[in-house]
Amino acid sequence: MSKICQYFFAPHSPWTYLGHARLVALAKQHGVQVEVRPFDLGKVFSVSGGLPLVKRAPQRQAYRLAELARWAEFLQLPLNVQPKFFPVSPDASAKLIIATRLALGVDVALELAQALMRGLWAEERNIGDDETLVQIANSCELDGRMLLKSSQTASVQAEYERNTEEATAASVFGSPWYIVDGEGFWGQDRLDFVARAFGKT
């Protein structure tokens, strides 16, 4: 039986964007099943002591920008550290990813998540806008209109809330967060440790 990686993430997180493709590649390399768990980071912040970006001290905000630029250059990923459409509500994009997973499976949902995050962080697109979400899904050769409609159903909302509750129960307090064999790893800069966990027998 293959290992499972619970992947808790918020699609508006630049750190999730920086780590997403590497996580997917590592999972394929090690034959690990990824559980796609978009969650409400704002709600988790409210119970874990996290602060929204605008409420953080200036020196923390400045260092965040420096680190984003540093990591983007290191990983050779396009990234605008201060995109036009940020801050943005992640709810609609998170629920679109959930609807895609339910309808089309994990691999397609992971591909769409990548496109959504690239849209926000590299292409100056508003992932809080329904029409933009449809366009991005269509660019992945999906039926964006159908998936958007599905994403607005009670069952998808219930899964989004359940993911958030399970994240809180698992002591998640940031995005991305990976859980392998019961051990949590916070941040794309922990993917080396995630890889080691994937390789353990």
Image (cartoon, rainbow, N blue to C red):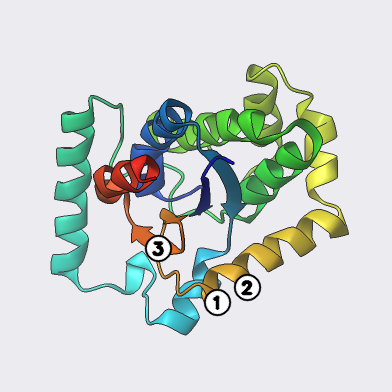
Instruction: State left or right for residue 144 relative to residue 129.
Output: right
Measure how far apart labels 3 and 2 are at the Cα level: 18 Å
Residue type at numbered disc 3: Glu
Q: Which mark is residue 38?
A: none
User: In the rendered image of this protein, does residue 27 appear above or below residue 62?
Assistant: above
Residue type at numbered disc 2: Glu
Q: Residue at 22% across / 45% down in the picture?
A: 68
Give coordinates of residue 144: x percent, y percent. 76, 28
User: In the rendered image of this protein, does residue 56 appear above or below residue 115?
Assistant: below
Q: Nearer the viewer, mark 3 or mark 2?
A: 3
Visible residue check, residue 83: no
Q: Nearer the viewer, mark 2 or mark 1?
A: 1
Measure how far apart labels 2 and 1 are at the Cα level: 6 Å
Q: Which mark is residue 183?
A: 3
The kind of secondary structure element at disc 3 is: strand
In primary-sequence order, the first of circles 1 and 3 is: 1
Quarter of the view holding residue 122: top left
Residue type at numbered disc 1: Ala
- Cβ atoms at labels 3 and 2 below 8 Å apart: no
Measure how far apart labels 1 and 3 are at the Cα level: 13 Å
Q: Residue at 14% across / 40% down in the picture?
A: 70
Q: Nearer the viewer, mark 1 or mark 3?
A: 3
Q: Which residue is mark 1?
A: 169
Instruction: State left or right for residue 26 relative to residue 105.
Output: left
Visible residue check, residue 16: yes
Give coordinates of residue 84: x percent, y percent. 41, 41
Q: Residues within 10 Å of mark 3 (few under 14, many from 20)?
A: few
The kind of secondary structure element at disc 1 is: helix
Q: Which residue is mark 2?
A: 165
The kind of secondary structure element at disc 2 is: helix
- Cβ atoms at labels 2 and 1 below 8 Å apart: yes
